[in-house]
């Protein structure tokens, strides 16, 4: 109960309802609805709409595991806990979430049926037994008997056969059986299995499939021949994942081993949701809920498959049949024109700052820089914070090579990165084995910053190259998420980055900064100060401006300060992809604030802060959203972009995204998101950025080819 008690202490302060604020959880559900809307958007290629349907489901799974799990833990507290924006109790929030989820499920069912209907003319059908001929039914029965039934483990619940443990998100067939004497039993059959295929081909109809769990459910009576099957359904549960990582700090424990033991607890945590594919009688549902310890109001009936991951197999089939028009045009990250990858990068970075924009530009130059630093005789150390990494990470390989080459390599691996704990534990071992010094974060603070410091020994002292980014050091997500990465030889930034690492090594946080904004002590307060500066300019009748691009806005201190700025006449433009607890456009409160959300092909993940106008404008990129957990409960780093050319580029990117009327939706004063019509031809900012990246790369290649041709001519 320690975790709940801590939350109680923090959240039972007097809370007041503010008219321009929205509940965090309900705002997140609105974000996921925008994802679902893309699955039903006719302007999105059909094959890609399948992806959005699957993302909607996986997003909702994680939301229930983390956010609903947390709220349900809070409901067990001895005191009533209220959130600080709408004054809702934990129980009220859960009830509102359940209601909103049921409404979204209805929309999901409609969109799914629409998708399946549009796939039929493309040669794809997902059918059930009602649409099979007698001959096809016999073929599938034979397939079931030979290829599926031998691998199934049917379980009839009794005193000798207790109810089996149900794994998180696995699919099970559940049935109510009746004996000849009239007694009833419950049967459970696991349907999630790596042995047999999920999509079963109908041999007489090319491109026609049945889901394996539906096949199992249909032939379930064959497995219980001595019983009558009274009712049956597919079942899937979502388990709480809200483990308390703060409780494991103990000087007598090995932190990494303790983390390994803690994350094992997640497997067996109580369910927070149960989904059924068929209606069951109330008595059976009540019995299942009692056994699984989940409330009856947390049971959802859905017409959509319980696991949507099979859509990726459908996409593979569509591509294999040459139907590429059903997908987005292929895109891959381009080389930045700022660097010449044929020559060493360190001398180029010493000459100018470089800004990489993912996924439009490749992460490769940064990886190349790490490998170059690993071999450079002038480099004495590499320090880095790691939060989420790719499988077979080249970044880790570069750090290993640096350590093996005798460099001092210090890496903070955050073992509490949710759902990446096990991967990070393994990487921490690999780094240690290579001779890197590995630390695991701070007591009470996750380290979420994206910070890399390369230190070089020069005749006149130490020289720094610093990389600060908005996204993880992950090659895979750098091709899927929009992020920004600044690489600079600015020594002021380098010295402050060195101070951040010096504090981390002592288990401390930075107390004061000049250039960088560093949470938990030097970010929120500095943001508030810069908002206050704009308020003062507005009060003097001067032009005042704030532009913010983040993933989420929940920090009440910043929200109230933004509302104050709006009331003073400051123009505020915000691009907030996900949660936005501030409602814009409310007269007398937030009427000078405009909020846009972009949900597109690539996940918007970059953070940009803008304060001021024209020559006095300050521009930052950051790892931190405006959430309390980021601004005062984590180590985060924001860096100013000092190069005028790069500042102008970021401002142009921001303005382009604000004018995106293809994927950008405006948040209204009613708290709903609406389409916009701003341009004669709809503007898709992500597609524009990619078109520019391709054009720049082609021009750079032409210059390289011309230079090579000239060099050959000179040689000859």
Image: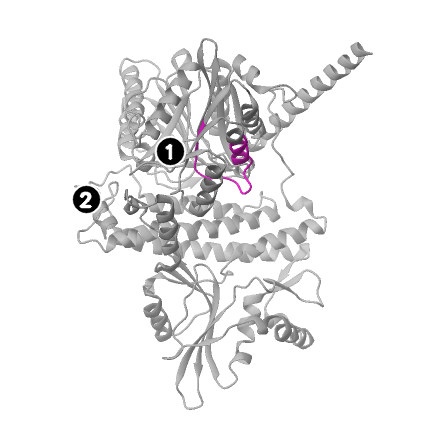
Left or right position of 548 against 427: left
- Looking at the image, can residue 583 be seen? no
Q: Quadrant of residue 105?
A: bottom left
Q: Secondary structure at mark 2?
A: helix
Q: Quadrant of the C terminus?
A: top right
Residue 282 or residue 375, whichever sits in front: 375
* Vertical side of 673 occupied by 128: above or below: below
- Looking at the image, can residue 271 be seen? yes
Asked if the residue at tag 1 contacts the one at tag 2, i.e. Cβ–Cβ closer than 8 Å, the answer is no
- Residue farthest to the bottom? 181
Q: Position of residue 429 (x, y in %)?
A: 46, 42
Q: Mark on residue 9?
A: 2
Q: Position of residue 20 (x, y in %)?
A: 28, 36
Q: Which residues are magenta?
A: 383-401
Q: Mark on residue 205?
A: none
> Is residue 399 inside the magenta stretch?
yes
Q: Position of residue 319 (x, y in %)?
A: 68, 49
* Vertical side of 187 occupied by 256: above or below: above
Left or right position of 258 against 193: left
- Judging from the image, the colouring scheme is one colour
Residue drawn at x 39%, y 25% as measured from the top left = 638
Q: Position of residue 285 (x, y in %)?
A: 37, 71
* Vertical side of 296 occupied by 344: above or below: above
Q: CA distance from mark 2 to mark 1?
A: 24 Å
Residue corresponding to mark 1: 625
Q: Secondary structure at mark 1?
A: loop
Q: Earlier in the sequence, mark 2 or mark 1?
A: 2
Residue drawn at x 29%, y 38% as measured from the top left = 443
Q: How many marks?
A: 2
Nearest to viewer (mark 2 / mark 1): 2
């Amino acid at each position: 109960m320690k975790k709940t008690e801590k939350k109680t202490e923090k959240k039972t302060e007097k809370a007041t309802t503010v008219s321009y604020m929205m509940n965090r959880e309900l705002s997140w559900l609105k974000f996921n609805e925008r994802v679902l809307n893309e699955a039903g958007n006719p302007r999105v290629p059909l094959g890609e709409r399948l992806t959005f349907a699957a993302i909607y489901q996986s997003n909702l799974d994680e939301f229930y595991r983390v956010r609903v799990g947390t709220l349900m833990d809070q409901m067990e507290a001895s005191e009533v806990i209220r959130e600080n924006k709408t004054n809702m109790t934990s129980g009220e929030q859960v009830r509102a979430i359940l209601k909103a989820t049921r409404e979204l499920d209805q929309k999901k069912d409609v969109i799914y049926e629409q998708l399946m209907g549009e796939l039929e003319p493309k040669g794809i059908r997902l059918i059930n037994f009602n649409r099979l001929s007698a001959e096809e039914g016999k073929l599938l029965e034979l397939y079931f008997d030979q290829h599926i039934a031998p691998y199934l483990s049917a379980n009839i619940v009794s005193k000798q056969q207790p109810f089996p443990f149900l794994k998180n998100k696995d699919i099970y067939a559940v049935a109510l059986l009746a004996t000849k004497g009239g007694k009833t039993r419950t049967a459970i059959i696991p349907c999630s299995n790596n042995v047999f295929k999920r999509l079963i081909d109908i041999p007489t109809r090319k491109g026609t499939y049945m889901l394996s769990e539906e096949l199992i459910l249909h032939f379930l009576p064959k497995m219980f021949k001595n019983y009558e099957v009274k009712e049956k359904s597919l079942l899937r549960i979502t388990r709480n994942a809200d483990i308390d990582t703060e409780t494991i700090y103990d000087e007598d424990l090995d932190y990494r081993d303790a983390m390994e033991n803690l994350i094992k607890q997640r497997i067996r945590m109580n369910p927070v949701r149960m989904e059924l594919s068929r209606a069951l009688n109330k008595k059976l549902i009540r019995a299942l809920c009692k056994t699984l310890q989940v409330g009856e109001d947390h049971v959802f009936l859905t017409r959509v498959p319980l696991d949507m991951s099979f859509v990726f197999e459908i996409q593979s089939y569509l591509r294999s049949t040459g139907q590429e028009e059903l997908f987005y045009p292929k895109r891959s990250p381009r080389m930045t024109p700022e660097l010449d990858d044929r020559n060493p990068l360190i001398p180029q970075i010493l000459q100018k700052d470089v800004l990489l924009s993912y996924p439009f530009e490749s992460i490769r130059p940064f990886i190349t820089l790490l490998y170059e630093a690993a071999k450079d005789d002038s480099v004495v150390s590499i320090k880095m914070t790691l939060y989420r990494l790719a499988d077979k990470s080249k970044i880790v390989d570069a750090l290993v090579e640096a350590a093996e080459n005798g460099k001092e390599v210090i890496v903070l691996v955050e073992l509490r990165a949710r759902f990446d704990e096990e991967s990070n534990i393994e990487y921490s071992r690999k780094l240690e084995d290579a001779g890197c010094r590995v630390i695991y974060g701070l007591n009470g603070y996750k380290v979420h910053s994206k910070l890399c410091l390369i230190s070089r020994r020069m005749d006149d002292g130490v020289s720094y190259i610093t990389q600060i980014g908005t996204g993880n050091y992950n090659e895979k997500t750098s091709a899927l998420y929009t992020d920004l990465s600044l690489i600079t030889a600015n020594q002021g930034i380098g010295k402050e980055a060195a101070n951040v690492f010096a504090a981390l090594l002592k288990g401390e946080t930075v107390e004061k900064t000049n250039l960088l904004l560093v949470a938990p002590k030097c970010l929120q307060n500095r943001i508030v100060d810069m908002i206050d500066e704009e308020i003062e300019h507005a009060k003097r009748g001067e032009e005042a401006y704030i532009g913010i691009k983040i993933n989420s806005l929940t920090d009440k201190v910043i929200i109230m300060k933004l509302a104050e700025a709006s009331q003073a006449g400051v123009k505020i433009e915000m691009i907030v992809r996900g949660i936005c607890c501030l409602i814009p456009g409310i007269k007398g409160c937030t009427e000078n604030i405009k909020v846009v959300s972009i949900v597109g092909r690539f996940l918007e993940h970059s953070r940009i802060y803008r304060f001021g106008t024209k020559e006095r404008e300050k521009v930052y990129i950051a790892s931190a959203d405006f959430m309390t957990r980021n601004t005062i409960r984590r180590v985060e780093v924001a860096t100013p972009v000092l190069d005028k050319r790069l500042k102008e580029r970021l401002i142009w990117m921001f303005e382009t995204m604000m004018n995106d009327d293809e994927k950008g939706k405006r948040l209204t004063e009613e708290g709903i998101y609406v389409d916009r019509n701003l341009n004669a031809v709809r503007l898709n900012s992500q597609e524009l950025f990619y078109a520019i990246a391709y054009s720049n790369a082609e021009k750079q290649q032409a210059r390289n080819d011309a230079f090579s041709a000239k060099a050959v001519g000179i040689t000859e």
